[in-house]
Each structure stands twice: as structure tokens, then as C-alpha cells.
């Protein structure tokens, strides 16, 4: 096996709270079909200034002069990306020449695969040319578009990485990433030749609606540990309005979603069925919605034979969500990704470092069984230093 090479992964997710970055070692094996498990060397993060967070949120919907605003927001985001890269290099004392490439996901503001013209699009704001210029390191960006061009959803892209890191030879495992949107990876036992392909899909809202509702009614940016939700009660009428009133939940995979669907207006429309609902009860019911969408997918996979659910993303730090998942899946061990040596806030950034490595050695990064693409594709576009 070849010597390990350093990569940086950068992720700013649909929660819109900031940027997480990791510096990792990955073996660039010849042919790179089966690169070894990465080793995380450093983690750094930077929160978004409120003005940038608000602009990125606003750009999820049509607005005045949005092309100009999107270009400026992409540049502002890449400046934050560059700060995270510099922090990683400083903490590791590595020269930038030691890093082969940066995998930069960008900020998703529109995600409409297969829509409109049969192809659709996915749009992640950033300025990868500026990032390469600022950092002096090759940048790999725009990971989702090639899968969409091949008839896929372009998301989720993390199941292949989840299989490499969290898969077990003796058991079926599910991995739930709870960012702004929640996505589920379904991993058959790697030691079972008849186990079938890795599965995965976006299962519904994660923190996007929870954070919106918390900010609106408490002023806090998020419901820390789910403590506010824990003071409320689940409202059956609202739960049904949210669940049965949304066709997305009944769609079979492959499927993906985003703030294009699960946004404040979507919630307001369904709250009309419960005009007198107490805010804490709404928060409790939204928490239950995230739990229900994930648990339904886990319970139906391989006739309910999943032994372990690994939870990552910001939602893994929400105690009320974690308790709800454990209660909804009594026969499943529910634990955070810490148990597998990768803290919840580092998982997605590590996945995009891994995807950058796949691009640099021209290995496919998508799973057609997950996204619905016509075949395996090398994902990303290169912006040389």
C-alpha cells in the first residue's frame, strides 16, 4: 500500500451554523478502489457571522438581485473556508505542500434533481478558485453535479464513506446524519456475499425546522440538548399533519430533499391544523417527526435486522432526539459516532476529504443504488493551486 497522503475536508451543512474542517491522512492505494480508513489528524471550526448565515438562508428562495448576492455570499463563505484551512495547518505544523487537495462541499442553497427539464440541478455556493488562490492547495469542489448529470439525486453522497468507516462484517448497521436535513445510510454486513448493496437516502428534516422554531420563540440559535423540546408534549394532530400531509415521506428511495421543501412556510401551512399549539409542544412534535422518519427507515431495512444505529451531525448532541431514537428502536443499539472513533461534528468533513481523495485518484465516489445514477462516476471538479 502507498504511503498516506494528507487531505483536508470542509463542510458547511444545511444547519447553517458554520464550517467544520478536518485534516486527514488517507492511503492513495494504486487504483484507489479500496483506500484504507482515513486517520483524522486535526479538526477546526468557525461559526458563521449572523449576516452571512442570514444571507445564505435567504438565498434558499428566490429574491431580488440573487445572482449578485449569491456570488458575494460564495466568496464570503470561501473566506471562512480559508480561515479553517489555515487553522488546520497551524495546529498540525504541516506545510501546505503536504496536503494533496482540499475537498470543499460548498453551501447548498437549491437542490432540485430531475426537476423541470428531466435533469434538474443542485447548487452549492462557494468560490473554489479563490480558495485555491488563498490556500495554495488544489481544491476539489462541485461533488454533486456529476451524479445529477447521470440521472441521479446527487445526494446523499456519504453512504459510501459510512460503509468504509462504520460497516461491520457481522451485522447490518444504519448511520443517521442529522444536520439541517437528516440522511440515512443502510449498510449490509460486509461479510455477507448476499448482503446486497449499500443503501441510503434523505429521510426528512433534521435541525432545519427545529432551529427555526427555537430561534423564533426563544431567541436561541438551537435547542441545546433538546431541553426545550423535553418540556413539551407530542401533539397527535400536528404529528399526523406533518407526516401524512407530506408526500415526500411516502416516496421510495432514491430520494433527496433540502430547504427547498422543509422550510418555515411548509411548517406554517401545517400548523394551521393546530392554531393554539403551545410552542414547546410544536418543538416536541418536530423532534418526534425527525425520529419517526429515521426510525421508519431503520425498522424496514432487511426485515428489521439492523443491530446498530450510529448517529452523527449536530443532531447527535441533542439528548431528546437520541432518547427518542432509542425508544423508537428498542432492539437496536443507538449511539453516536464517537463510539467508532469519529466525533459527530467531524464525520461529514471527513467524508468530503475522502471524496476529494477519490477524485484525485479518479475513483468513483457515488453509489448508483443510493442516488439512482446510471452508473459509477468520478465526482467533483478540480481547481488547481
Image (tube, rainbow, N blue to C red):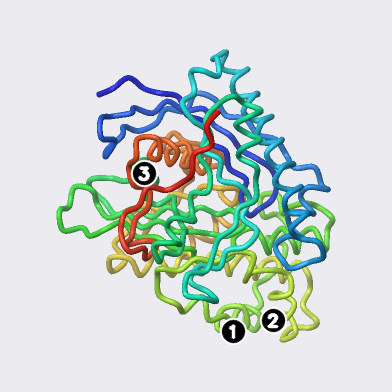
Q: Secondary structure at mark 2?
A: helix
* Residue for point 68% across, 70% down: 233
Instruction: Tell me the residue that label 2 is attached to.
Output: 270
Residue 371 to residue 173: above or below: below
How far, Cα to Cα, is label 1 from label 3?
A: 34 Å
| Foreground pick, 16 / 123 | 123
* Residue for point 40% across, 68% down: 254
Query: Which residue of the protein is positioned furthest toward the left in this rendering?
Result: 193
| Foreground pick, 265 / 213 | 265
Q: Secondary structure at mark 3?
A: helix
| Foreground pick, 324 / 118 | 118
Instruction: Tell me the residue that label 1 is attached to.
Output: 245
User: In the rendered image, which quarter is residue 280 located in?
Assistant: bottom right
* Residue for point 67% across, 67% down: 284
Residue 286 to residue 37: above or below: below
The quadrant the N terminus occupies is top left
Q: Earlier in the sequence, mark 3 or mark 2?
A: 3
Residue 330 visible from this viewpoint = no
Q: Badge 3 local density, few (<14 within 10 Å), some, or many (20+)?
A: many
Q: Secondary structure at mark 1?
A: loop
Instruction: Tell me the residue that label 3 is attached to.
Output: 166
Give residue 141's position: percent from left, percent from top.
53, 43
Q: Earlier in the sequence, mark 1 or mark 3?
A: 3
Q: Look at the numbered discs 2 and 1 and tell me whether their residues touch, using CB distance below 8 Å.
A: yes
Amino acid at each position: 500500500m502507498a504511503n498516506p497522503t494528507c487531505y483536508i475536508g470542509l463542510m458547511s451543512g444545511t444547519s447553517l451554523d458554520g464550517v467544520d474542517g478536518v485534516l486527514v491522512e488517507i492511503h492513495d492505494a494504486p487504483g484507489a478502489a479500496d483506500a484504507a480508513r482515513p486517520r483524522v489528524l486535526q479538526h477546526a471550526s468557525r461559526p458563521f457571522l449572523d449576516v452571512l448565515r442570514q444571507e445564505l438562508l435567504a438565498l434558499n428562495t428566490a429574491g431580488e438581485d440573487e445572482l449578485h448576492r449569491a456570488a458575494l455570499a460564495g466568496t464570503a463563505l470561501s473566506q471562512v473556508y480559508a480561515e479553517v484551512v489555515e487553522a488546520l495547518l497551524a495546529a498540525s505544523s504541516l506545510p501546505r505542500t503536504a496536503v494533496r487537495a482540499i475537498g470543499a462541499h460548498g453551501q447548498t442553497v437549491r437542490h432540485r434533481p430531475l426537476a423541470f427539464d428531466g435533469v434538474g440541478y443542485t447548487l452549492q455556493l462557494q468560490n473554489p478558485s479563490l480558495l485555491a488562490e488563498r490556500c495554495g492547495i488544489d481544491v476539489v469542489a462541485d461533488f454533486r453535479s456529476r451524479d445529477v448529470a447521470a440521472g441521479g439525486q446527487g445526494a446523499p453522497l456519504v453512504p459510501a464513506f459510512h460503509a468504509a468507516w462504520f460497516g461491520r462484517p457481522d451485522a447490518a448497521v444504519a448511520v443517521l446524519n442529522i444536520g439541517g436535513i437528516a440522511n440515512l445510510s443502510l449498510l449490509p454486513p460486509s461479510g455477507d456475499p448476499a448482503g446486497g448493496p449499500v443503501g441510503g437516502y434523505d429521510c426528512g428534516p433534521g435541525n432545519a425546522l427545529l432551529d427555526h422554531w427555537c430561534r423564533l420563540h426563544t431567541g436561541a440559535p438551537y435547542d441545546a440538548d433538546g431541553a426545550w423540546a423535553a418540556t413539551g408534549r407530542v401533539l397527535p394532530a400536528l404529528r399526523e399533519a406533518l407526516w401524512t400531509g407530506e408526500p415526500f415521506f411516502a416516496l421510495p428511495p432514491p430520494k433527496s430533499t433540502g430547504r427547498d421543501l422543509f422550510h418555515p412556510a411548509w411548517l406554517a401551512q401545517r400548523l394551521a391544523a393546530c392554531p393554539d399549539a403551545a410552542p414547546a409542544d410544536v418543538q416536541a412534535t418536530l423532534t418526534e417527526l425527525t425520529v419517526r422518519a429515521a426510525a421508519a427507515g431503520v425498522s424496514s431495512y432487511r426485515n428489521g435486522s439492523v443491530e446498530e444505529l450510529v448517529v452523527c451531525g449536530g443532531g447527535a448532541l441533542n439528548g431528546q432526539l437520541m432518547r427518542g431514537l432509542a425508544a423508537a428502536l428498542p432492539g437496536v443499539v443507538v449511539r453516536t459516532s464517537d463510539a467508532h472513533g469519529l466525533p459527530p461534528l467531524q464525520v461529514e468533513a471527513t467524508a468530503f476529504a475522502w471524496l476529494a481523495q477519490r477524485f484525485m485518484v479518479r475513483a468513483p465516489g457515488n453509489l448508483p443504488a443510493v442516488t439512482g445514477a446510471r452508473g459509477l462516476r468520478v465526482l467533483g471538479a478540480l481547481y488547481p493551486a
